[in-house]
Image (tube, rainbow, N blue to C red):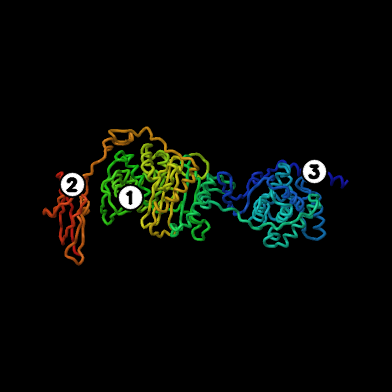
Amino acid sequence: MNVRKGVLWGLRGLGLWFALVFFVPFPHEKLKEHPQNIRYLDQEGGLLRRSLGEGGMDSDWISLEACGSWVGPALIAVEDQRFYQHAGVDPLAVVRAMGQNVLHMDVVSGASTLSTQVIRMIEPRPRNLRTKFIEAFRATQLELFYDKAFILEQYLNRAPFGGNRQGIASASRRYYGKEPEYLSAGEAALLMGLPQSPSRFRPDRAPNKAERRRETVLRRMQEEGMLTEMPILSEGRLWVEPPLRAFHFTEWIRRRYAVKGGGFHSTLDPGVQQQCEAILERKRSETLYAETDGVGIVVMDAQTGWIRAWVGGWDPEHPLHGNVDTVTRRRAPGSTLKPFAFAMAMEQGWLNPESRLEDLPQQYRDYRPQNMDERWSHDVSAQDALVRSLNMPALHIVGQLGVDDFLSDLRSAGMELKDVRSEDVGLGVVLGGGVTVSLLEMVEAYSVFARGGEGLVAQGKDQGLETRERVYSEGVAYWISRMLSGPERNDALYGHMGEVSRPALAFKTGTSHGARDAWAIGWNAQWVVGVWVGRMDGVGVDGLSGSRHAVPLLGEVVMGLMNDKQEPWPQAPESIQQWNGQEVVMGVTELNHAQPKVVQPRICSPSPESELFLLDDETIHVRLEAMGEGETVVHWFVNERWIGERKIHQPLVYSFSQGDYEIRAVFADGSAESRHLKVRKM
């Protein structure tokens, strides 16, 4: 009677067990939670870099099929020989464990199955009898809802393999430098012996224990009929480091897109990236670059905004410079801002490529700007002034635009210019004074010229086109591109290459004050390419300039991008028309400003309201000079007294003692101009 009651109660308990299995909620969502490495991939799927995901675990999730032929059998042989026969709990293993525990008067076996271990991994609990019961119950549920292949895949991806390595993919790559599918039987046996006690069996720390554990796994495999004979064992390679390519680009990706785990397919073109790296490897050994230790290159697709190449330094593994990304680091831009001033003036309608501009010395309080060649051209066209990067015409333009409006225009194009105020930088901002810009910002900003006035935001992944608000009209963008391109510009960019086809490219250079930064930004309808060269510590380099150091790199990069195909410039937009013999942008150019301006004669030295100081001498020599067209005669007067005559651009040197003077120049057409000069003793 007692036996019957026992059986009845047993059946009732079993029925309640399975009823609870069906109706107690199972934590399905926890099977989807898993820390994963971040795998940065290039456009073709090649691995650029692998970094740890959330939690600092080294782990990649892979499918059971990708685990190869030996991993699964080795695991089952050593951990759960009846895996395919039980339903989450192995009754024979339970009976055997109970007997062993009673015999030894201690817990020496827990009768764990792969299913209960998966539950333990997703829901860690204190190790006690209650936990064993819960794990057995959850394992039964797991087997009810999922098939064996799913459970095996869960285990292989969650099991610990020593240190922060989790899952077979990480273990195989780190210990043997290969994917799990290529593991031999002996290699799989060594790895599958680790999860039972990863710290005790790690081959890099306890090679003898690891070898004995591997022999145990292989013997079990042989006993289960998985092996007909013991395999020849190989040492393999231990602690293989993952690849590290395009480090600075992947760091930007991580910050820009807040990547947390899994595979990230980027826009980087491996061919273009390798070309840029190879060019730098050749160039860094040249004498020209001996004094520099910093370089940056960005290649952006002008149609999509995709970053195709990103080189953030000569050497990403440099102990001091490796973590400094020259593409995102902010530096003084030099003359690279000038095209935006010319474009803004053209957009306002009062400037076109043939407009006449003055290039004469002028004093701005204690600031007296000079041109790179320390010469003055007096009267130049806007195109000539921009191509030659003359300083004074650019300062005149910004003076008419207004510094606040010019800064706003630069921001609209894509330059951040945080906390930059017009009263702090003044007109010198157009020469790069008082502001810093990153190479990436510069490339984004110049995309307005490559795309007909509408700029792009750089993209590291294919997530659709992201454009900025239109900055310039199509005609103005075309003007700037045409002004800074052409056969002569090609010679400066590529050198004289005979019959070799050279891609059409507009470009602008820049050199910051003190020869600290050399820039070259090139663009056409297909590409925008930026180059920066200098020193990482910001120290100036004698002779450093954009045209000398950055342009050769730009030319080689663009030649590599061309791939024997020359992209022609787009045709002039319909908005560009002829009016009274002058080219204008219809609807933009003010027609009364379209004709070249006649430069009126004027005094260029001394500067207005000059104040000079005597040292030990009783007099000081002052250069009097006027500018204008032709060879007009100028009559000079000091305090209404005639002192001589000279032709335009011919200086007259006169001696002044202490006092206040009015200097007057009378020109042949009857016009006149005056300057006030004060001479003081120190």
In this view of the protein, which residue sits in the foreground, 443 or 358? 358
Q: Secondary structure at mark 2?
A: loop
In this view of the protein, which residue sits in the foreground, 646 or 195? 646
Q: Amino acid at mark 3?
A: Arg
Left or right of 466? Residue 199 is right
Q: Which residue in the protein does label 3 denote?
A: 12
* Depicted 502 relative to depicted 537: above or below: above
- Residue furthest front as drawn: 498
- What residue is drawn where x is 55% and y is 52%? 245
* Depicted 544 relative to depicted 353: above or below: below
- Pinpoint residue 541: horizontal percent, then vertical percent: 40, 59
- Pinpoint residue 613: horizontal percent, then vertical percent: 21, 62
Q: Which residue in the protein does label 1 denote?
A: 422
Crowding near pointer 1: few (<14 within 10 Å), some, many (20+)? Answer: some
- What residue is drawn where x is 16% and y is 53%? 663
- What residue is drawn where x is 44% and y is 57%? 289
Crowding near pointer 2: few (<14 within 10 Å), some, many (20+)? Answer: some
Left or right of 77? Residue 336 is left
Q: Earlier in the sequence, mark 2 or mark 3?
A: 3
Q: Earlier in the sequence, mark 2 or mark 1?
A: 1
Q: Is residue 390 visible?
A: yes
Q: Secondary structure at mark 1?
A: helix
Q: Which residue in the protein does label 2 denote?
A: 632
- Pinpoint residue 117: horizontal percent, then vertical percent: 71, 51
- Pinpoint residue 293: horizontal percent, then vertical percent: 46, 58
Q: How far apart are the two marked residues, 3 and 1, measured between alpha carbons? A: 86 Å
Left or right of 312? Residue 384 is left
